[in-house]
Image (cartoon, grey):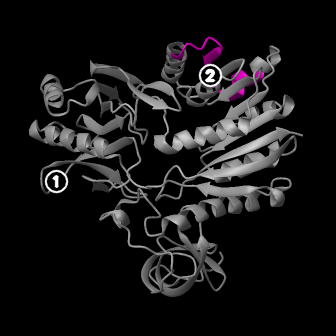
Amino acid sequence: MAETIVKTGQTVPLKIKRLGINGEGIGYFKRLIIFVPYALPKEEVLVKITKATPRYAEAELVKVKKPSSQRVVAPCPVYYECGGCQLQHLAYHAQLDFKKDLLLQALEKFKPAGFRHFSLLPTIGMEDPWRYRNKAQFQLRKNKKTNQIEAGLYQANSHNLVPLTDCLVQEPRTQKVMNTVVRLLNKYDLPIYDERTNSGIFRTIMVRVGIQTGELQVVFITRSQKFPQKNALIREINERLPEVVSIMQNVQPQKTSLVMGDETIHLWGKEAIEERINEVTFDLSPRAFFQLNPEQTKVLYQEGIKALAIEKDDTVVDAYCGVGTIGLSVAKYAKEVRGMDIVPQAIDDAKKNATRLGYDNTRYEVGTAEELLPKWLEEGFQPDGIIVDPPRTGLDAKLVQALLKHPARKLVYISCNVSTLARDLVELTSCYQVDYLQSVDMFPQTARCEVVVKLTKK
């Protein structure tokens, strides 16, 4: 077996060369690559090895001997414990440069055809890159020492809960509701789920706000359908939080890291809250996916619509459509819009949203893009433009084959993972040319980035 160059617990000096895909600093010790969270390019640092293998090592930052001019003091008091953000210690303008560089690193790794000539536009950032998240999804636990119920996020790669009463990237209204609900759970001493014994009831609280409408929804995620003190809790929420218009329960009986289960129970008020983006109003039910940063979502979709360059008689497919956000934003310009999603509730919402907007040129179906798109193409439906907005895993191989077999004139790829985007472009560029890539900062203070890619059939 190859010998490790460094040993766990060893302290070594490093010069940081660049940032990796998770926002961690990367340096080399005797040609061994070392990953160091919270270190920045051009810094000289002292690090302690936490994991050593023959091919790479991980380390924690002990001391910054020569700091970067881009280093700032992270304003969040639990930033280094929580792990929800990765870049609060990096000046915001430098975060935007990093997100463009992230894209370049991914393209260089996968080398899609002609990638050295791709046009990479500067990342579009936010004027105020704080308090933007419209949804808080906090785990619950009973603190054994204080006997108090707490809500927060798990530390990276662990199940240690970091309690949060004020998160700097969370919309303040969601945090206010979360704190009040946790106080009520304490007041009634409700049974909190314990994953070690698989007992208790309340697992997670989700709070979502319609930024434009001010409507708030609370979802109690429980291990079973049981809900002790239900009426008392609903009554108190009504009294203390008149802005909450929807209270729901979601049942997740499985021992899993998946937050939500399949069953949702309507407890009080509306079943969905409303949100508006680009003049389009959307209904959001508890399980419907919706972008976490509505202000930048507006920018992202405007960039997607611009890249699609829609003409009057165009037919458009909105793959991975969710509640119809992108497709319904272009429906008024198009001849026909079709969308698909695997969540039936999201498709119901998309249909309702289309009806409310008075669009009769839309068609939404439950199913995967890789099944439905080839089916529609075989039936003779020939879209002029296709928008794909896949999950972090990127495009399914079957869908890529369908896009290559029946290429549309215009393809817009909206990506939330630069690595799977670069991988998919390797194949797509055999048939499409890449006009440009536009990164959009949807998640300031984190290492995540969204990209809009304009592709045209060769």
Horizontal and vertical percent position of residue 340: 62, 23
Measure the alpha-carbon separation of dots 1 and 2: 45 Å
Q: How many residues crowd mark 2 within 10 Å: few (<14), some (14–19), many (20+)?
A: some
Number of marks in the rendered image: 2
Q: Which residue is mark 2?
A: 367
Horizontal and vertical percent position of residue 279: 51, 28
Horizontal and vertical percent position of residue 175: 28, 45
Asked where in the image residue 109 lies, by quadrant, the reply is bottom right
Q: Is residue 399 above or below residue 129?
A: above
Q: Is residue 193 visible?
A: no
**Quadrant position of the N terminus in the picture:** bottom right
Foreground pick, 418 / 214: 214
In the image as oriented, which residue stretches furthest toward the right? 458
Foreground pick, 210 / 138: 210
Relative horizontal placement of residue 343, taking residue 191 as reference (left or right): right
What element does badge 2 sit on? Answer: loop
Q: Which residue is mark 1?
A: 144
Q: Is residue 293 above or below residue 12?
A: above
Part of the protein shown in magenta: 357-374
Report the amino acid beneath label 1: Lys
Report the amino acid beneath label 2: Gly
Q: Is residue 113 visible?
A: yes
Q: Nearer the viewer, mark 1 or mark 2?
A: 2
Asked where in the image residue 265 lies, by quadrant, the reply is top left
Q: Residue at x 86, y 55 (%)?
A: 114
**Quadrant position of the C terminus in the picture:** top right
Foreground pick, 356 / 143: 356
